[in-house]
Image: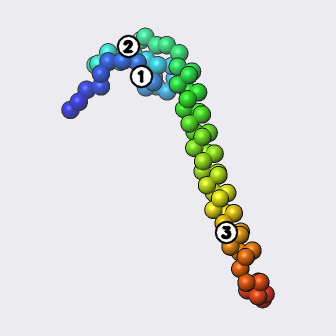
Amino acid sequence: MSQVPPGWYPDPDGKPCNRYWDGANWTLETHPLDYQHSFNEMSQKISTGWKLGIGLAFVLGILVLAFISSDPSLWEY
């Protein structure tokens, strides 16, 4: 079984900080979250949302154009 190397990781209790893992145990040492890292995650999520939104708008636009350009006699009941 591979061991997790010592280093700073998100707090296992879910607190808004990083906690040091010494390779065997969590220490009492903490430091604030890296806000730049959090900002990068947020911008990536926003970017993904925009990509999905643009893709959905494109597909809906094609469907609307296909419906509009179809034979008008199909619209009658």
Q: Amino acid at mark 2?
A: Thr
Q: Amino acid at mark 1?
A: Tyr
Tell me the quarter of the image containing the C terminus. Answer: bottom right
**Relative to 51, 73 lies left or right:** right
Q: Residue at x 45, y 24 (%)?
A: 10
Distance from disc 1 to disc 2, alpha carbons, whole Å, reads 11 Å
Dividing the picture into quadrants, the one containing residue 67 is: bottom right
Secondary structure of residue under mark 2: strand
Which of the pair 56/32 is nearer the observer?
A: 56
Q: Residue at x 23, y 30 (%)?
A: 2
The numbered mark, 3 or 1, whose residue comes first in the sequence reads 1
Secondary structure of residue under mark 1: strand
Structure colour scheme:
rainbow
Q: Which residue is identified by label 2?
A: 27
Q: Amino acid at mark 3?
A: Leu
For disc 3, the neighbor class at 10 Å (few under 14, some 14 to 19, many from 20) is few
**Relative to 23, 13 lies left or right:** right
Residue 68 picture location, percent across and down = 75, 74
**Image height check: is 13 above or below 72?**
above
For disc 2, the neighbor class at 10 Å (few under 14, some 14 to 19, many from 20) is few
Residue 5 picture location, percent across and down = 30, 21
Q: Which mark is residue 63?
A: 3
